[in-house]
Amino acid sequence: MPQQKVKSLKQNAFKFSKSLTGIKGLDEITYGGVPKDRTTMLLGGAGCGKTIFAMEFLVNGVTQFNEQGVFLSFEEKTSELVANSASMDYDLKKLVEENKLYLENLQIDRYEILKAGKYDLEGLFIRLELAINKVKAKRVVLDSLDALFFGLDSFVLRSEFKRLLSWLKEKQVTAIVTAEIGDGQLTRHGLEEHVADCVMILSNRVTNQISNRRIRIVKYRGSMHGNNEYPFTIDEKGVSVFPLISEAAQQ
């Protein structure tokens, strides 16, 4: 493809409404961040960094872009989130006290949301709306949401998940939903990636006793994005993604 056309396409990519993540390198390979007021799926296996990635998105929102955030976890307790984030130099407790960040471990028995044989997420919507209003949030993370959906009818699940994404869009919040990657399909249920606007996969491979973390954008509706697998690191300074040198030279 001619260089002039590539340059034009990249310029057009920036016109798509996006929210900067503040994560080093990620805003470069997405040409401006994640879809604004829409939902991004962040997929991967256990220990690949999904929760840390999502938390940095929220913390950066508060500290760099003056956008308050809500973090609802369906697995980790809030005390665990605070303790684990302390090593990353994130003072979550302070942000919570300043009403800039809302943290909650939401334990919802999936059988409790089955009413008269019909799957119903209204309880989740109510809790989420209260949290968003409390801190006037513009960013939301639903961590390990797929744990709530395990074993449910796929047709109903797809419908309810689509309703959730529409609800988040109506609230005008930029959301990240994390989930375990599936076996032979992107997610456990093989559904969510079809209704989300953006899908990213994290992996953590160990070769010759050396850990290699990678991120790949498999879908970004309405926008150009980097198509390769990119290495990333997690240390005390947070998450850093490393775009390929050849790509950086073209920008």
Image: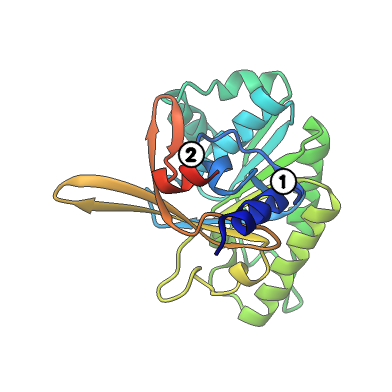
Q: Residue at x 16, y 47 (%)?
A: 209
Query: In this view of the protein, which residue sits in the foreground, 58 or 36?
Result: 36
Q: Mark 2 or mark 1: which is in front?
A: 1
Residue 239 relative to residue 120: left or right: left
Q: Using the image, determine if residue 118 lies above or below residue 72.
A: below
**Element type at mark 1:** strand
Classify the position of the N terminus by image quarter.
Answer: bottom right
Q: Earlier in the sequence, mark 2 or mark 1?
A: 1
Residue 18, labelled with which disc? 1
Few, some or many C-alpha atoms within 10 Å of disc 1 (few <14, some 14-19, many ≥20)? Answer: many
Q: Name the kind of residue labelled 2 in the image.
A: Ile
Q: Using the image, determine if residue 158 lies above or below residue 113.
A: below
Q: Residue at x 74, y 24 (%)?
A: 99
Residue 42, labelled with which disc? none
Q: Quadrant of residue 71?
A: top right
Q: Which residue is mark 2?
A: 52
User: Residue 69, position in %: x, y?
Assistant: 70, 35
Residue 68 relative to residue 204: left or right: right
Which residue is situated farthest in the left direction here?
Answer: 208
Q: Name the kind of residue labelled 1 in the image.
A: Lys
Q: Residue at x 38, y 51 (%)?
A: 214
Instruction: Report how far apart the C-alphas of labels 2 and 1 lie in the structure.
Output: 21 Å
Classify the position of the C terminus by image quarter.
Answer: top right
Q: Quadrant of residue 198?
A: bottom right
Q: Residue at x 80, y 50 (%)?
A: 126
**Element type at mark 2:** helix
Q: Using the image, determine if residue 189 lies above or below residue 229.
A: below
User: Residue 183, position in %: x, y?
Assistant: 40, 73
Few, some or many C-alpha atoms within 10 Å of disc 2 (few <14, some 14-19, many ≥20)? Answer: some
Q: Using the image, determine if residue 20 lies above or below residue 213.
A: above
| Residue 114, visible in the rendered structure | no
